[in-house]
Amino acid sequence: MHAGLALGILVLAPAAVGAPPPPPPPQATDAGAIARIEGYLNRINTMQSRFIQINPDGSAWQGNLYVNRPGKFRFEYDAPIPHLLIANGIWFYHVDKELKETNVLPLVKTPAQFLVQKTVSFSDGLQVTGFQNEAGLLQISMITRDNPELGEITLTFSDGPLELRRWTIRDAQDNHTQVTLQNTRFGGRLPSKLFKYVEQPDKTSPE
């Protein structure tokens, strides 16, 4: 998977150097709305959704997303896309089912930690770089303070009621990847097996 494409789902990032400095933080008048967003994200325990991912080259991938906070998610792409992304609370696994290969990273070393961290706080490890409230949509942009080269994340919410609708990743090369959620459901139990990594068979083994 191209690193920029995987970044679109908050898990991988290009090894970018010299990212431009972020814009000034939002005005204090936005603090109430930002606090609402924090509260909303922290109330999410489980979530499942269809998603459409628009990649920088214009291609569109679809699949199913499962989130179990804290620490666990699964991005399962529809065929013929062979990728599967799993976080089990400690490790992030990028599985290429076609090549029968798996890349493993500590979850805390990926932007995905924001999506599933125990407590979401825009003042703890994150820097808000922009905020908009117009036409019934709230948009908040942020970078991680320690790793700004991972890219800028913009979350978009509908307002009334408040609900996460999509996110967009802008990397240091100004490539944009957008993920839109559809038919999202919150709450309920998710099978633990969704978040367990199953080792891929050795591609050199006989069938």
Image: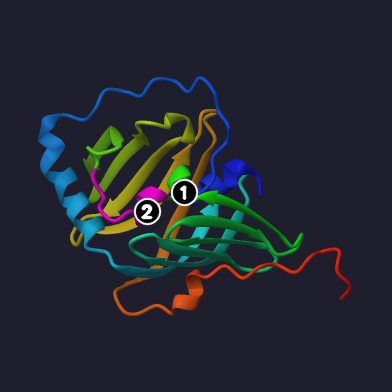
- Residue sitting at 39 percent across and 53 percent down? 166
- Residue sitting at 48 percent across and 23 percent down? 19
**Which mark identifies residue 66?**
none
* Mark positioned earlier in the residue sequence (1 or 2): 1
Q: Quadrant of residue 101?
A: bottom right
Say what amino acid the circle numbered 1 marks.
Answer: Leu
Position of 25 relative to 193 (above/below): above
Q: Which residues are magenta?
A: 113-121
**Which mark identifies residue 115?**
2
Q: Position of residue 52 (x, y in %)?
A: 51, 59
**Tag 1's secondary structure?**
loop
Q: Badge 2, how many Cα within 10 Å: few under 14, some, many 20+? A: many
Please tell me whether residue 75 belongs to the stretch shown in magenta: no
Q: Position of residue 202 (x, y in %)?
A: 79, 65
Rounded to the nearest whole Å, what is the CA distance between mark 1 and mark 2? Answer: 8 Å
Q: Quadrant of residue 48?
A: bottom left
Is residue 56 visible in the rendered image? The answer is: no
Q: Is residue 50 left or right of residue 138?
A: right
Check the image and tell me how it is coloured. rainbow
Q: Position of residue 24 (x, y in %)?
A: 27, 23
| Residue nearest the observer in this picture, 65 or 12 | 12
Q: Quadrant of the C terminus?
A: bottom right
Mark 1–mark 2 CB contact (< 8 Å): yes
- Residue sitting at 18 percent across and 60 percent down? 160
Please tell me whether residue 115 belongs to the stretch shown in magenta: yes
* Residue linked to disc 1: 10
Q: Position of residue 26 (x, y in %)?
A: 21, 30
- Residue sitting at 28 percent across and 34 percent down? 128
Is residue 188 visible in the rendered image? The answer is: yes
**Tag 2's secondary structure?**
helix
